[in-house]
Image: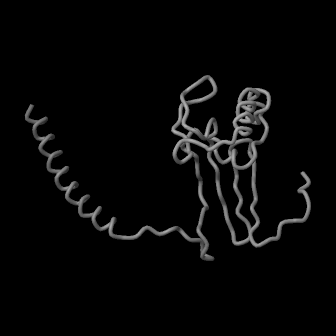
Amino acid sequence: MPAVAAAMGTAAIAAMVLGSLDAAGQAAASAQPRTVPRAAYGKPDFSGIWQVMNTANWNILPHAASKDGPAGMGVVEGGELPYQPWAVQKRDENYKNRLTADTDARCFLPGVPRIMYEPFPIQISQTPAVVSMFFEYEHAVRNVYMNTPHPPGPIEW
């Protein structure tokens, strides 16, 4: 029992010392403004590995758990979208046909922005000329060219 009491005493002292250091460190850290990481050429640096930590892939609005996916708080500010009547009908039609029309259900590559909501990591690499996104989902790659005019006409795939 004396060993337990000694260990508890040591833990209490360590907590006091670390607690006082932490408080001092927090005060100093909170006084410094946060800065956006910048690339060598001055633009914001998005390079790194990113992952969505929400359930927007299943529904961007707040939703309960169902056989279609997990519950989620949603990503829409205020929790509602001001749908027009025709849009409500289209939303309901899409939901009814989700098992045959949804790109995820058919293992097709989702478009943008949906692929950004997939619950898998994304690696972003950037240079002054191009920002490349490498998706774990379907091993997709998206290149966004900077300072390049959009080609005229439709994009041929």
Name, please, the residue furthest toward the front. Answer: 85
**In this view, 135 is above or below 89:** below
Residue in the image at 19% along x and 58% along y:
20
* Percent of width and height locating residue 9: 11, 44
Name which quarter of the figure residue 154 lies in. bottom right
Compared across the picture, whether 95 is left or right of 76 comes to: right
Foreground of the two, 22 or 72 = 72
Q: Is residue 3 above or below residue 19?
A: above
Q: Residue furthest bottom?
A: 41
Whole-percent x, y for residue 23 in the image: 24, 59
Q: Residue at x 55, y 40 (%)?
A: 74
Q: Position of residue 107 (x, y in %)?
A: 77, 34
Horizontal side, residue 60 vs residue 141: left or right = left
Which quadrant of the view contains residue 105? Answer: top right
Q: Residue furthest left?
A: 2
Q: Eyeballing the image, is 110 above or below 129?
A: above
Left or right: residue 42 versus residue 16 is right
Q: Residue at x 14, y 50 (%)?
A: 13
Front residue of 83/62: it is 83
What colour scheme does the image use? Answer: one colour
Tell me the quadrant of the picture where the N terminus can be found.
Answer: top left
Q: How many discs appear?
A: 0
